[in-house]
Structures are given as structure tokens and as C-alpha cells.
Image (cartoon, helix red, strand yellow):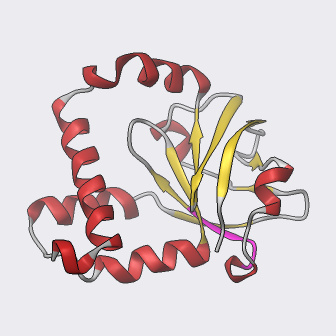
Amino acid sequence: MSKFRGRGESKLDSKGRILLPAKFRRSISQEAEERFVITRGTRGCLYAYPLDEWKKIENRFEDIPENLENSELKTKLNEFLIESNLDSQGRIGPLGDLIGIARLNKDVLLIGVGSKIEIWDPQVREEVRNNIDNRDDTEKKLDELYYKAMKMIKNPTKNG
């Protein structure tokens, strides 16, 4: 099981790849086979899940009741999802359309949050840190759906 902690800085290269800091590369479980699934996250960042962690989430999505809100969440997470192998230099990507979704520029902030890595533009992260309550209603609703779904995935008997 991969566990990521702390923060690191990186750069987005001209091909849309990000070099993972060594401390994050050391935390990747063997089960992940050095493969990541990268998708849009909440609050304006991207989520990079090791493949084994993403498979757990994906399998549990089947347990979430089907309705309009849950369908939108599934679409949000899968619409621009990419799978990426960690290359020989320790990079993931290319990120393609996800670069624009997360408003990434050259500098990138990586934050280890348990089983995933959040990928941020440093300025966006600062804005969110200072203005978490000033997001538009659609973004707030999608974030709430994401957290609700993650709670259901982790505790299906309590929420299902």
C-alpha cells in the first residue's frame, strides 16, 4: 500500500510531465507496478493515485447508488483521466488536458495525502488556502459529492 506524506516541488516539462520527488517515488508500493492514474481532484488540483489504489476506488464505485449527482461525480473523475507509467527518470504524464483543468504552469506543488498525491499550481493552492469558502456553487457541490462518495467507498456498510 502506497502512503504519501509531506510536500515537494517540481516542474512541468515541455511535454507535460512532472518529475516526482524521490521521497514520493520511494513510497510507491510494488503492487502499483510504477503506474499512476491521474484525474481531476477537488479544490482545483489533480489527484495522482498509484494504480493499485485507484483500482480499489474504481471497484467500490460500483457500490455507489446510481443517480444524477453520483453519475456526474463519476464523469468528473473519468472524463480526463489518464494512466501513466513512471518513466526511467521518475516522471509521470504527459498530463494533456489536465494541465488546463488544474491551471498548471511551470512550477508544480505536490502534496502527499495518504494514498494519493495532490498536484497543484502553487498560486492556485495559495488561493484555495486563503479562500476555501469563496468557491462557486457548482465546484462546492462537486467537491461535496466527491467527499460523500469517498466516505461511501471507505465505509460501505455505514453509508450504503
- Tell me residue 123's x, y (percent): 56, 20
Query: Which residue is found at the position 42% from the left and 73% from the top?
Result: 57
Query: Which residue is found at the position 35% from the left and 71% from the top?
Result: 154
- Tell me residue 48's x, y (percent): 58, 57
Q: Is residue 34 magenta?
A: yes
Q: Residue furthest left?
A: 67
Give the camera-side residue of 3 and 126.
Answer: 3
In the drawing, does residue 121 fall left or right of residue 69?
right
Give the camera-side residue of 43 and 99.
Answer: 43
Query: Which residue is found at the position 68% from the left and 33% from the top?
Result: 108
The N terminus: image quadrant:
bottom right
Q: Residue furthest front?
A: 158
Against 13, is 28 above or below? below
Query: Which residue is found at the position 86% from the left and 51% from the top?
Result: 22
Q: Which residues are magenta?
A: 33-37
In the drawing, does residue 61 fall left or right of residue 98?
left
The C terminus: image quadrant:
bottom left
In the drawing, does residue 104 fall left or right of residue 16?
left
Numbered marks: total = 0
- Tell me residue 54's x, y (percent): 51, 72
Give the camera-side residue of 110 and 6.
Answer: 6
- Tell me residue 8's x, y (percent): 74, 38
Against 49, is 140 above or below? above
Q: Is residue 133 magenta?
A: no
Q: Which picture quadrant has residue 32?
A: bottom right
Q: Which picture quadrant has residue 93?
A: bottom right
How would you classify the magenta stretch by its main secondary structure?
strand
